[in-house]
Image (cartoon, rainbow, N blue to C red):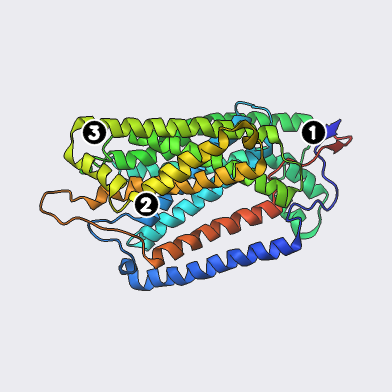
Amino acid sequence: MATHTPPAGADLGFESDRLRRVWYGFIAVLLAAGAVALYVRLTQGLTSTNLTSIVPWGAWVAFYIYFVGLSAGAFLVSTLDTVFGLPGLDRISRDALFVSLVSMAVALLFIWVDLGRMDRMFFPFIWRQFSSALSWEIHAYVLYMGVIGSSLYFSMRADLARLAAHSSGLRERIYTLLTLRRDETTAAAERVDRRWLKRIGIAGIPLSLFFVVGGEGVLFAVASARPYWNSGLFPVIFVVSALLAGTAFMLLLYVLRTRLLDGATIDRDLVDRMGTLLIGLIIADIAITAIELLISVVSFHAEVIETWQVIMFGEMSWSFWWFMIGAAWVFPLVLLTNESWRRQPSVAVVAALSIAMGVVGVRFNLVVPAQILPVLEGLPHGSYFPTAVEWVSSFGIMGVGLLLYTIGAEILPLTPLPETESDTQ
């Protein structure tokens, strides 16, 4: 029977030691710079930022909601295989789950740095406020991360057991620990894993849509003092852009990982399917944004219209035109709507990277502009652009995410192990 039994000493890391050294060196630079910026943040407080009582949410919150959305989007991409069984997506479903878990950790680091009293991060678990959307959201995050971890376990348990059987020393102990002592690699055991994986995935879909990324939109939508945020479409906007960012990131990661880590052949049919999905998600993102703009205009609500003016023609116009319109929509559409281009891995990487960066602009447009305008007439207008401390600390936090993912990619079977003949039944 054909099984996924790995050869002894299977190497899950980089194909090139030189590339490994360069990559870890790059991460080390990010972490060192981020540590310096974090030290400044800890010693000087929020005075090291451009955050004020008028604009209390800035880059850290924008990146927080970006990575929460990226996590939910990656998780939902994984369910295309684990729940719906779409062909070819088994190559990326484990990777998507691990990216989802790492992205949530990064998102929580961003919101932790943003807290005025960072030492009080555990307070919501001690003093619960049932009328607070934020309190519900934090508890949903914990449950959601449990769902991701469980899905990841059942998706790769059998391969972990095979690696444990063909490893020695520290790696053997790690793999044995991660299997939770369930070392069966029979077809029956794998069917049980797949059955539980599907059940958990089904439960995780509404959790990620309505409580994680949708709930993230609710945090803004319930702020009635900010009419631009106070919209029923806001949670929907968060969901659509999360799916767009998650799909783009997984396409980018699939191509790069296949070439740099797995040394395998890139499945151009999979690249084509994911590129086609990205086209649909870009169109959906454009449509929902256009509907939101239309409602804002025809409502004749002065503050909402003024907020859109700030986004499109004011100090946030760079984010709207260059990142949101250009990088997230127009440029990738030009590349992906050509079928022959869409099947090219290099073109797919450029389009996916453009989208992943462009959605950052979408997040900035959601967070900052509504705070620039005064809540009451007569109060001063706000102004905001991140300081060097905010930018550098943000890159440092992203470096933590890159380090976590890289270590996982070098140890865990995030891609199904190659098939070989075995007598395992």
Q: Is residue 99 visible?
A: yes
Task: Give the residue drawn at x 64%, y 64%.
Answer: 24
- Judge depth for marks 1 and 2 and give the one in front: 2
Q: Position of residue 187 (x, y in %)?
A: 78, 30
Is 2 rendered above or below residue 258?
Answer: above
Which comes sooner in the sequence, label 1 or label 2? 1
Amino acid residing under circle 3 = Val
Query: Where's the C terminus, which quadrant?
Result: top right
Q: Which residue is mark 2?
A: 318
- Judge depth for marks 1 and 3 and give the one in front: 3
Decide if residue 234 is on the left or right side of residue 199: left
Task: Give the residue drawn at x 30%, y 34%.
Answer: 293
1 and 3 marks in contact (CB < 8 Å): no
Which comes sooner in the sequence, label 3 or label 2? 3
Q: Position of residue 54 (x, y in %)?
A: 22, 56
Q: Which residue is mark 1?
A: 186
